[in-house]
Amino acid sequence: MGGAHRPERVAVVPVAMGLKLALDATAALLLTREELATGGPLCPPCLVACACSLIAAPLGVPETLEALRHLQPVWAGGAPSTATLA
């Protein structure tokens, strides 16, 4: 969905992905904390899902930051930089 130059051409997609990964990791931590608070046995599939969310979150950071850097001139009222597309 956007190819190798996705952060420059379709910057909204990596930003949305970064937001989703952050929300997933937060939800995983909150649900794990709730599971620990109940005092019952821990659910192995739940712990695997939590681990996957926590591992995936930092993997999306570089692309999200690159997209945000690309959008920064747009927020300042200018045009997005296309120097990286050459």
Image: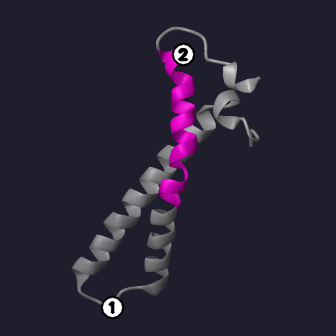
Q: Which residues are magenta?
A: 56-75
Q: Nearer the viewer, residue 52 or 73?
A: 73
Q: Is residue 67 above or below residue 18?
A: above
Tag 2–tag 1 contact (CB < 8 Å):
no
Q: Amino acid at mark 2?
A: Val
Question: Does dot 1 land on a helix, a strand or a loop?
Answer: loop
Q: Nearer the viewer, residue 70 or 29?
A: 70
Q: Can I make out residue 45 in this image?
A: yes
- Give the image location of residue 15, x and y in percent: 54, 38
| Quarter occupied by the C terminus | top right
Q: Amino acid at mark 1?
A: Pro
Q: Does the magenta-highlighted stretch encompass residue 64?
A: yes
Between the C-alphas of marks 2 and 1, the distance is: 50 Å
Q: Report which quarter residue 13 is drawn in.
A: top right
| Mark 2 lies on residue | 74
Q: Can I make out residue 16 in this image?
A: no
Residue at x-position 62% and y-position 18%: 81
Answer few, some or many: residues within 10 Å of disc 1's Cα (few below 14, many 20 plus, some between 14 and 19): few
- Give the image location of residue 9, x and y in percent: 70, 28
| Quarter occupied by the N terminus | top right
Left or right of 31 in this view: 63: right
Q: Nearer the viewer, residue 86 or 43?
A: 86
Residue at x-position 52% and y-position 28%: 69
Furthest residue to the top?
77
Q: Does the magenta-highlighted stretch encompass residue 2?
A: no
Q: Which-is-in-front pick, marks 2 and 1?
A: 2
Left or right of 63 in this view: 58: left
Q: Is residue 23 above or below residue 11?
A: below
Which of the numbered marks, if any, corresponds to residue 41?
Answer: 1
- Give the image location of residue 18, x and y in percent: 51, 45
